[in-house]
Image (cartoon, rainbow, N blue to C red):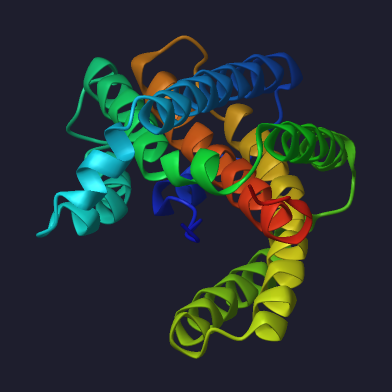
Amino acid sequence: MNTNKPPLHFDSVSDSANGDVAKNFVANVFAWMTIGLLLTAFVAGYSASSGLYLQLVGSGGLMSWVILLAPFAFIIAMNAGLQKYSATTLTVLFLAFSATMGISLGSVFLIYSIGSITQVFVITAGTFGVMAFVGYTTTMDLSKFGSLLFMALIGVVIASIVNWFMQSEMMDFIISIVGVLVFTGLVAYDTQRIKRIGAGVEYGSAGATKLAILAAVSLYLNFVNLFLFLLRLLGGRR
């Protein structure tokens, strides 16, 4: 799933500096992201080991498409409902999104060995942590790289669709490398953007909670896509 368009609502938030508030907000975002990733990992492992994934995919009809597209529907719903949904509703949607992603990623446990998945996960976590630290601490304005990264992301999506028909191993290798670079850059970019958002919100308010959940979705998608591209490059198949 290669989508990471930042929620448009973020750009309208004040850039005023408030270090403590920003720190608390960023910590909240990372906490939600971690909860989402843990839920996804649990559901993915369960859906693979229990046979749920194969049962759903093998049932035929539209179920395969539902599994593939359901996460997109949750992302659209969360972004569209930022103003009208309560923080509780957004929380439920986020958890449902994470669980649905887990089902769609059940195939990972069927294709790759557990050792490979664990190794790549550790590499992903390390890379993510380093780039998040860079994005949080750097004094360089990374906003100018946002449009470049987004254009590169669109290129990766288009190339992936084309290669779905071509089935070229070389093209898949190139796409995977570019994908790793794009999402590595997006981790730093989004972390800095989230830090700025946090400096302009009232920490602890319902609005801050809703923004934190949407920000967590962006970081969550960065992590998952970085993991998947690294898995395609480094993962050992069963």
- Tell me if I can see residue 77 in this picture: no
Residue located farthest toward the front when viewing the structure as drawn? 238
x and y percentages locating residue 34 in the rendered image: 58, 21
x and y percentages locating residue 27 in the rendered image: 65, 17
Residue drawn where x is 53% and y is 38% of the image: 109
Residue drawn where x is 26% and y is 21% of the image: 92
Q: Is residue 145 above or below residue 96?
A: below
Q: Nearer the viewer, residue 98 or 46?
A: 46
- Tell me if I can see residue 140 in this picture: yes
x and y percentages locating residue 162 in the rendered image: 48, 87
Residue drawn where x is 42% and y is 19% of the image: 209
x and y percentages locating residue 9 in the rendered image: 40, 47
Residue 114 horizontal side relative to residue 119, left or right = left
Residue located farthest toward the top when viewing the structure as drawn? 204
Q: Is residue 197 above or below residue 237?
A: above
Residue 93, image quadrant: top left
Q: Is residue 206 above or below residue 231?
A: above
Residue drawn where x is 59% and y is 70% of the image: 153
